[in-house]
Amino acid sequence: MIKGYDKEYIVSDGDSRYSLLDIDEKYKDKSHAFCSAHLRRKILEAIKHDNRSELVIDLIDKLFEMENMTDGFIIWNK
């Protein structure tokens, strides 16, 4: 990880190399989130096997639309 990183969240692309973020005690105070664009791509691959995945794609697209409406400024409250 980045030395001195003190934020609450770490976003990764879901690669298995980042699984240590979920199990290593050094990161227990961090929340591990996955990149929505990478998640969307994986779900698009799943549509080939299960068309119910289309619903999830629709929801992610709605989230992207909402994010675009905020012009990139989202305030996270605890």
Image (tube, helix red, strand yellow):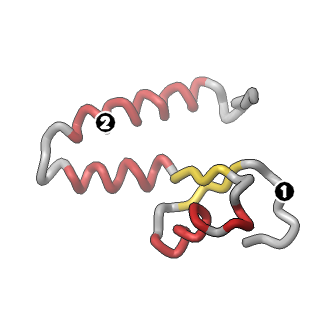
Drawn side of residue 49 relative to residue 33, left or right: left
Instruction: Give the residue displayed 31% in from the left and 36% down from the top.
Output: 56
Kind of residue at disc 2: Val
Q: Quadrant of the N terminus?
A: bottom right
* x and y, in percent, of residue 19 in the image: 52, 68
Label 2 sits on residue? 56
Q: Nearer the viewer, residue 74 or 19?
A: 19
Indicate the secondary structure of the residue bearing disc 1: loop
* x and y, in percent, of residue 61 in the image: 40, 34
Q: Examine the image and state in which quarter residue 20 appears.
A: bottom right
The mark tally for this picture is 2
Quick one: label 1, few (<14), some, or many (20+) residues within 10 Å? few
Q: Is residue 41 above or below residue 24?
A: above
Instruction: Give the residue displayed 75% in from the left and 29% down from the top.
Output: 78
Task: Please report whichever mark, 1 or 2, sits nearer to the chain's N-terminal start.
Answer: 1
Q: Nearer the viewer, residue 65 or 48?
A: 48
Q: Nearer the viewer, residue 4 or 40?
A: 4
